[in-house]
Image: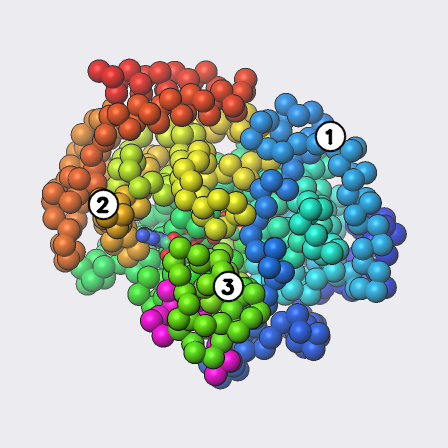
Amino acid sequence: MTSNKYVLNWIDEMAAMTKPDKIVWIDGSEEQADRLRDEACKTGEMIKLNEEKLPGCYLHRTAVNDVARVEDRTFICTPTKEEAGNINNWIAPDEMYARLKKLYTGSMKGKTMYVIPYSMSVIGSPFAKYGIELTDSIYVVLNMLIMTRVGTKVMEALGDSPDYVKGLHATADCDPENRYIVQFPQDNTIMSVNSAYGGNVLLGKKCFALRIASYLGRKENWMAEHMLILGVTYPDGSKHYVTAAFPSACGKTNLAMLIPPKQYLEKGYKIETVGDDIAWLRIGQDGRLWAVNPENGFFGVAPGTNEKSNPNALASTRKDTIFTNVCHNLDDNTVWWEGLNDNPPHNAINWKGEKWDYTKYDKADKINTSGAHPNSRFTAKAENCPCLSDEFYKGAGVPVEAIIFGGRRAKTAPLVYQSTSWQNGTFVGSIMASETTAAAAGAIGVVRRDPMAMRPFVGYNMGDYWAHWLKMGNLIPNPPKIFHVNWFRTDAEGHFIWPGFGDNMRVLMWILGRCEGKYDADLSPIGYLPKAEDINIEGLNGITRDTIRELLTIDKQSWLDDVAHIREFYAFVGQAVPHALYDELDALEARLKN
Ligand code: GTP
Ligand code: SPV
Ligand code: MN
């Protein structure tokens, strides 16, 4: 497929180490993908689902110990520890290469090594970056075919250039003790071993498009962010784009595909999705910040997705989709997950591959009693999304008016507020916090700081990453305004107060209104808060102006407690934290005490 000697030499070297029986290039054709699907069904790696109800759809179950990203096994191997910083795990590159070599050696004996040439962003566009993933997993190949642009065209675009990201993935024994997800930013290299799950092995996604790309972005004056991109079309036909960074499993896919409340639809408002997880942002010739979605599909959280919460995501999964770790309904050979509907299948296999008894479901022990794993996922083509923006197919990107940060906070953070400047907005991103979710292995529901939703994904020192944000603010002549939202405030009984989902449009419209200078706001210690009457609650059941006022309250004591946590966190991030952010923190504390 290529005569690129950099690529061929590297593949030879990797094959000499892993020793596959054969090497197969993935050309991006449907014929080849079909043969691989057949093979995966024969070996039991995938299950073909009901062709009438779910055409072209498959089910896959990963090892029970391999169901989420593993942050404690993820490394950034820069030459010095200082470059990776304290937030990232670090081991010296030489030592890590040696360690990995032992694990890779002979790991593909008796197997096929697939060579996947892929592009992040539209091939040939100014944003595009190329990668090659070597893997011994058909599941990975089939997912990459959905999530990225794959095949011969990529090799043509790469030509004889050495400028591509090398990715090696070996399933090996799927041994959690020897699982490694390793980025070598200086070498444009990713190495993943002993996992076969999503973000650990689809190397174009978090490993490349965030960890490696954030490193490249710093060098080249652009940004790689854990952000959805969506467009709002107004009744006058004008289009307005925002990006939003929420931590894993905190609502990006849902916001990106939202269906506006009736009142907005009747007036002619429309939402279009450009991306649901990752944004690459560059300064345009017009001085604005432009965003593309480098991916070609969605690797979305299945549980909670239903006809009401996210009909567009559900529609995206009705054909050509790979489901991972959901519940298998044996009666009609379809899939099910918690929150799809109120009719759990009676004759079903759970995510672990065991017979499932829905009557034993216990909310307090979801992992062991649910049909689908809480982090079960669908891999669906972007083109199957009913509200996909035409801009998705163009390589030029969309101009961003607002950047929205957000987290899962039962208290503290109000429904929405606006930062007072790019620097203050960078500070707001740096102090983001959220309750942990099932998207990563480890405890769930614990508040942790997750700056810009990038804690697991920054490919270098977090402090330097904040400095890069501040620098970008100086470079962008007309930067987006920066906001913060929280859909997850709870009442005394622990219920979410804000209805969320489609009704988040109401908050979005305040945000865009602020960008247009349409609304006044109240300056509070943390930033600009909406006037309660400027959040549209028309047609909302049970939500009054007082509810909005409650959602916008700032409890000074809990913010002061937060300031103390932030100080500890900044100290942990270390020397590289920019002084400007300490100035912001001091000023916030002073305003709260005043
Ligand atoms: P990753 O793919 O892991 O990066 O996640 P994501 O940020 O795309 O999250 P997603 O949209 O898949 O939502 C994750 C969970 O949050 C689902 O269970 C949703 O039902 C829930 N969720 C999303 N939006 C809202 C909301 O507005 N309110 C409430 N209460 N829950 C929400
Ligand atoms: C996330 O965890 O933020 C995801 C899923 O989007 S994964 O690809 O596994 O990282
Ligand atoms: Mn994500």
Count of marks, rendered view: 3
Asked if disc 3 and disc 2 are in contact, CB closer than 8 Å, the reply is no
Q: Which residue is label 2 attached to?
A: 491
User: What range of the chain is rendered magenta?
Assistant: 329-343
User: Quick one: label 1 or label 3, which is nearer the N terminus?
Assistant: 1
Q: Main secondary structure of the magenta part?
A: loop
Is residue 332 located in the magenta-colored stretch of the structure? yes
Question: Which secondary structure, mark 2?
Answer: loop
Residue 284 picture location, percent across and down: 47, 38
Which kind of residue does numbered mark 2 sit on? Answer: Asp
Counting residues from the start of the chain, the first of labels 3 and 2 encountered is 3
**Front residue of this view, candidates 416 and 86:** 86
Mark 1: is the Cβ under 8 angstroms from ligand 2?
A: no
User: Which x, y percent locates residue 438?
Assistant: 48, 51
Viewer-closest of 284 and 455:
455
Q: CA distance from mark 1 to mark 3?
A: 36 Å
- Is there CB contact under 8 Å for labels 2 and 1? no
Q: Is residue 13 above or below residue 468?
A: below
In the rendered structure, find residue 378 and report the number of the disc placed on it. 3
Tell me the element at label 1: loop
Q: Residue furthest right?
A: 16
Q: Which residue does the numbered mark 1 point to in the structure image?
A: 92
> Label 1 amino acid?
Ala
Q: Is residue 418 above or below residue 271?
A: above
Q: Secondary structure at mark 3?
A: strand
- Looking at the rendered structure, the kind of residue marked 3 is Phe
> In 3D space, how far apart are the residues under numbered discs 3 and 2 (Cα atoms)?
32 Å
